[in-house]
Image (cartoon, rainbow, N blue to C red):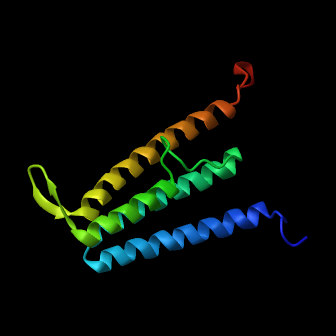
Amino acid sequence: VLFRSERPRYGFYVDHVLDIVGITLLLGGLACSGFMTPVIALAMLVAYLLVSGEVFLATAVHGVFRISFAGFGPTELRILLMVGALRAAATPLVPVIGVGPMRLFDVGGVVAVGGLVVAFVASCVRNTSALYVAEPLPQHDAEAA
């Protein structure tokens, strides 16, 4: 009976603590490897943590966990990183029109930061609007004032 014992809060907490530690170690490793500029790796980590924090806050106030944005979530990010690692093993540079060759993970990191920032802003606007509607300002009686 030990199996199939659900502990949703424990699982939620442990899973996301491990995700945060994992992405920190992954991006720290990329920054130290020379495959990614440390500043871009840090920007990507900050953007990822901003989105994570917003998702966790939204989960606390709405009771619904939503981490994907436009069909793209952490699993897709990991798959993309895996494909990038296989590509970078063959050749770590990619041609960028108007710039010349750049590190694959720098190009991907800049795109990821942009996507994460868009997801963060969109989610903030959506959740703030939903909470504003759910908790309208109290109506004060004009005569009581």
Give left or right: position of 2 versus 55.
right
Nearest the eye: 24 or 89: 89
Which residue is most to the top? 143
Residue 110 image-quadrant placement: bottom left
Whether residue 37 is visible here, answered yes or no, is no
Quadrant position of the N terminus in the picture:
bottom right
Q: Is 20 located above or below residue 69 in the figure?
A: below
Residue at image point 42% right, 73% down: 26
Q: How many marks?
A: 0
Quadrant position of the C terminus in the picture:
top right
Q: Is 72 located above or below residue 105 in the figure?
A: above
Residue at image point 50% right, 52% down: 73
| Image coords of residue 38 (percent x, y) | 28, 72
| Image coords of residue 22 (percent x, y) | 50, 72
Give left or right: position of 143 versus 3.
left
Nearest the eye: 69 or 125: 69
Which residue is most to the right? 1
Give left or right: position of 129 versus 42.
right
Residue at image point 40% right, 65% down: 82
Q: Is 85 located above or below residue 58 in the figure?
A: below
| Image coords of residue 69 (percent x, y) | 50, 44
| Image coords of residue 68 (percent x, y) | 53, 47
Whether residue 72 is visible here, answered yes or no, is yes
Give left or right: position of 87 versus 116.
left
Q: Is 43 located above or below residue 129 in the figure?
A: below
